[in-house]
């Protein structure tokens, strides 16, 4: 690729700062799988020459992608495509915190997962709408319990479009960190998530799995994980304990 390719709408292109245009080209290359998670990028100088921009513009584009969690800067080594297990982004999409942890200064821990079921089925009407699927398309539904050192803290169902994950089987054991799995084996990088939160009462089955009294209050998190190319690639429904955990989000 030489200079930045012209956009279909020149007026819109001209309205964008040059570093944004460079960033968009780089994101497209990530979508196309030009660099895999964990792979080191060429130098700023080489990238700037390839895209036909100044080194300062290229640095600003890479800085923007680093802020977004798409890249990781490693002092003295270079710039790398972010992996979902990198410490800098591991908790980017995980906001549950044990009560009192902020006061004690304890570091958050990533919960372990135990899978209860793995089923492929025809997508429901709601699932077809969420994933833009056709009638008859299949989805995978994974049910799991997630626990920390104190025991089970949430029940979760993950729904994945089968066409995005073509070789999954009923024997597939998803790892604890599924976003790393998506990026490593399928080149699907989760760029952002949309979440809706509400208070609910525990269904009998979930109360038993979380060792809670029946009808206990829970926090429900409805999450849509969105890839770099704006596809919804995962729908997740989590029911979380509210007696020992809280949802924490820092706004800047």
Image (cartoon, grey):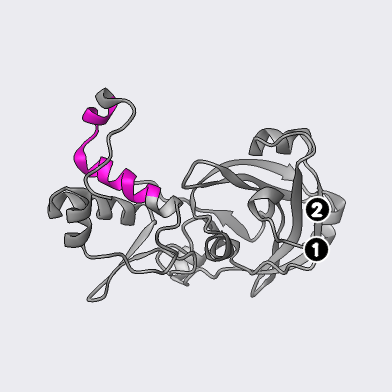
* Residue 161 seen in the current view: no
Mark 1 surroundings: few (<14), some (14-19) or many (≥20) residues within 10 A: few
Seen in the picture, residue 206 relative to 199 is either above or below; the reply is below
Read off the magenta span: 12-28
Q: Position of residue 251 (x, y in %)?
A: 39, 46
The structure residue drawn at horizontal position 68% and vertical position 49%, both measured from the top left corner, is 163
- Tell me, yes or no, whether the two marked residues, 2 and 1, touch with CB atoms within 8 Å: yes
Main SS of the magenta part reads helix
* Residue 2 seen in the current view: yes
Is 192 or 27 nearer to us in this picture? 27
Q: Position of residue 89 (x, y in %)?
A: 43, 62
Q: CA distance from mark 2 to mark 1?
A: 8 Å
**Magenta-span inclusion, residue 19:** yes
**Magenta-span inclusion, residue 15:** yes
Is 76 or 42 nearer to us in this picture? 42
Residue 207 is left or right of residue 223, and the answer is right
- Tag 2 secondary structure: strand
* Residue farthest to the top, as pictured: 11
- Tag 1 secondary structure: loop
The structure residue drawn at horizontal position 44% and vertical position 69%, both measured from the top left corner, is 86
Q: Position of residue 39 (x, y in %)?
A: 39, 69
Residue 168 is left or right of residue 223, and the answer is right
Report the disc number at residue 170.
1
Mark 2 surroundings: few (<14), some (14-19) or many (≥20) residues within 10 A: some
């Amino acid at each position: 690729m030489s200079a930045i390719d012209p956009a279909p709408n020149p007026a819109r292109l001209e309205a964008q700062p040059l570093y944004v245009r460079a960033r968009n080209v780089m994101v497209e290359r990530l979508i196309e799988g030009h660099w895999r998670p964990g792979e080191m990028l060429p130098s700023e100088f080489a990238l700037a020459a390839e895209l036909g921009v100044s080194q300062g513009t290229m640095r600003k584009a890479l800085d923007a992608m680093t802020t977004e969690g798409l890249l990781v800067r490693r002092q003295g080594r270079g710039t790398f495509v972010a992996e979902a297990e990198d410490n800098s982004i591991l908790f980017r999409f995980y906001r549950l915190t044990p009560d009192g942890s902020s006061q004690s200064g304890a570091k958050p821990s990533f919960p372990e997962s135990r899978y209860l079921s793995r089923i492929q089925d025809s997508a429901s009407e709601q699932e077809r709408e969420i994933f833009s699927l056709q009638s008859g398309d299949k989805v995978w539904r994974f049910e799991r319990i997630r626990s920390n050192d104190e025991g089970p803290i949430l029940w979760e169902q993950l729904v994945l479009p089968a066409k995005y994950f073509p070789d999954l089987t009923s024997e597939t054991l998803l790892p604890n960190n599924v976003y790393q799995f998506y990026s490593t084996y399928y080149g699907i990088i989760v760029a952002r998530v949309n979440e809706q939160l509400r208070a609910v009462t525990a269904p009998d089955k979930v109360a038993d799995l979380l060792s809670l009294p029946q009808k206990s209050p829970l926090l429900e998190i409805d999450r849509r994980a969105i890839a770099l190319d704006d596809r919804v690639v995962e729908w997740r429904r989590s029911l979380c304990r509210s007696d020992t955990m809280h949802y924490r989000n820092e706004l800047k």
